[in-house]
Image (tube, rainbow, N blue to C red):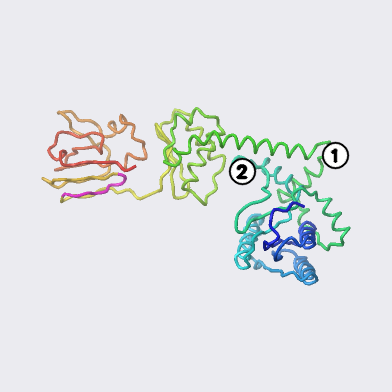
């Protein structure tokens, strides 16, 4: 059994009552490689056997003087019309972390084994969930508490043999055989039949290792964009020339720089890449409270903020209009700062220029056009942001700067 904790650490074992976790508990107990040992048991209250499993775990702990912390998920917590696997996992791990904080637990050990690893790899490969994570489960994860999988190199058969040899009690969860769950289907309908077709589980491990190595290489190449991601301005032209895997990595990094608790799918990333490489000059994608913009030159992500439509300036000073700072040194007449409107024109040397054309010629991204200040004095437009102004007297007293 792999050990990655110190003998003076406080250990907790997540014990369901199945053969995997009961064998892990027995092995750790016998090893005495800990300062303090706890057992964490969650009763989902979804099966009639749940109470007996809880009692069995309790009897074992009492017999060996191990403190067991129980948690019963309230009945009615789960929506019977949807898969409960992910919600149940979140509840379990939230409970584990609460217990770890209360008891100053250093390590929480789970009983994932070799067959679970193969199942996880197959699940992530077949459901396209390996692009932004390893196909494999990590043996050690987290910090305070750390989560570890000491049995990751043991097969399920080896655990059954240990339980029989050392008379370890356990109960079988019959729901593990219901193939309506995706993971169970993969386990029973695919993996269990591999040997009959002369297919090796080891080859699945090799595929996972290859993907891990490829991801590591992609990450190294993507490091050249670290500064651009940090500055929230990734060059479109440079990114277009990269391999698609690098493009995926950089775009995800840019989004996750500000979008923390939202899952970004590979389909969303690939759609962004499709537009990135096309002739489309501008596009935008909403992620929670942020928007990713593709412009002529760059990719950038910004928080969704209300747009200031207009301000009336009656005295000199410093004013903020969306992403712009407007400094008025002297005021001969009131001025209006507003967003552009359909049909806006700027009169220069007796010729009218469309504001929309001025913005296009200066390659102003579409998402920025409505935020650019249009300056009016005595009802006429005298300046278009920091792009162009006419010879009106007031322009010598006005400075417009864009915030970056």
Tag 1 and tag 2, C-beta contact below 8 Å: no
Q: Which label belongs to residue 150?
A: none
Q: Residue at x 73, y 62 (%)?
A: 15
Image quarter in which the C terminus is found? top left
* Foreground: disc 1 or disc 2: 2
Residue 218 spot, x, y in % from top left: 57, 35
Whether residue 64 is situated above or below residue 166 in the rendered picture:
below
Question: Nearer the N terminus, badge 1 or badge 2?
Answer: 2
C-alpha separation, residue under disc 1 versus residue under disc 2: 31 Å
The residue stretch that appears in magenta: 316-323
The crowd level at tag 1 (other Cα within 10 Å; few <14, some 14-19, many 20+) is few
Residue at numbered disc 2: 133
Residue 299 spot, x, y in % from top left: 43, 37
Q: Secondary structure at mark 1?
A: helix
Which residue in the rendered view is the most extreme toward the right? 165
- State yes or no: residue 83 in magenta: no
Name the residue nearer the viewer: 103 or 36: 36
Q: Residue at x 79, y 69 (%)?
A: 64
Which residue in the rendered view is the most extreme toward the left? 332
Whether residue 355 is situated above or below residue 10 in the rendered picture:
above
Q: Which label belongs to residue 196?
A: 1
Residue 330 spot, x, y in % from top left: 13, 46
Residue 385 spot, x, y in % from top left: 25, 39
Report the predominant secondary structure element of the magenta stretch: strand
Whether residue 346 is situated above or below residue 302 in the rendered picture:
above
């Amino acid at each position: 059994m792999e050990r990655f904790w110190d003998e003076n650490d406080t250990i907790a074992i997540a014990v369901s009552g199945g053969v995997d976790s009961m064998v892990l508990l027995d092995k750790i107990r016998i090893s005495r490689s800990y300062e303090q040992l706890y057992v964490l048991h969650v009763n989902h209250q979804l099966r009639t056997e749940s109470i007996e499993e809880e009692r069995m775990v309790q009897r074992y702990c009492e017999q060996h003087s191990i403190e067991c912390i129980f948690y019963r998920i309230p009945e009615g917590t789960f929506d019977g019309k949807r898969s409960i696997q992910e919600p149940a996992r979140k509840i379990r791990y939230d409970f584990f972390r609460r217990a770890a904080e209360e008891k100053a637990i250093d390590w929480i050990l789970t009983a994932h084994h070799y067959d679970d690893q193969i199942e996880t790899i197959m699940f992530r490969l077949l459901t396209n969930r390996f692009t932004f994570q390893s196909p494999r489960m990590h043996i050690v994860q987290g910090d305070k508490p750390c989560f570890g999988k000491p049995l990751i190199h043991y097969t399920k058969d080896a655990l059954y043999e240990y339980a029989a040899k050392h008379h370890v009690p356990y109960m079988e969860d019959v729901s593990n055989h219901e193939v309506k769950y995706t993971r169970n289907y993969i386990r029973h309908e695919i993996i269990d039949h591999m040997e009959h077709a002369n297919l090796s589980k080891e080859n699945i491990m090799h595929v996972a290792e290859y993907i891990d190595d490829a991801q590591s290489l992609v990450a190294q190449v993507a490091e050249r964009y670290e500064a651009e991601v940090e500055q929230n301005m990734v060059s479109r032209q440079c990114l277009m020339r990269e391999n698609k895997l690098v493009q995926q990595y950089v775009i995800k990094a840019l989004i996750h720089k500000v979008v923390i608790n939202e899952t970004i799918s590979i389909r969303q990333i690939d759609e962004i890449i499709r537009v990135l490489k096309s002739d489309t000059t501008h596009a935008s994608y909403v992620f929670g409270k942020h928007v990713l913009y593709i412009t002529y030159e760059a990719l950038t992500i910004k928080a969704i903020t209300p747009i200031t439509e207009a301000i009336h300036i009656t005295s000199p000073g410093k004013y903020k209009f969306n992403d712009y700072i407007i400094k008025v040194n002297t005021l001969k007449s009131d001025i209006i700062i507003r967003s552009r409107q359909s049909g806006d024109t700027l009169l220069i040397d007796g010729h009218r220029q469309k504001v929309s054309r001025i913005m296009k010629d200066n390659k102003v991204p579409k998402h920025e056009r409505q935020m650019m200040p249009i300056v009016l004095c005595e009802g006429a437009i005298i300046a278009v942001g920091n792009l162009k102004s006419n010879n009106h007297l007031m322009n010598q007293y006005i400075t417009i700067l864009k915030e970056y």
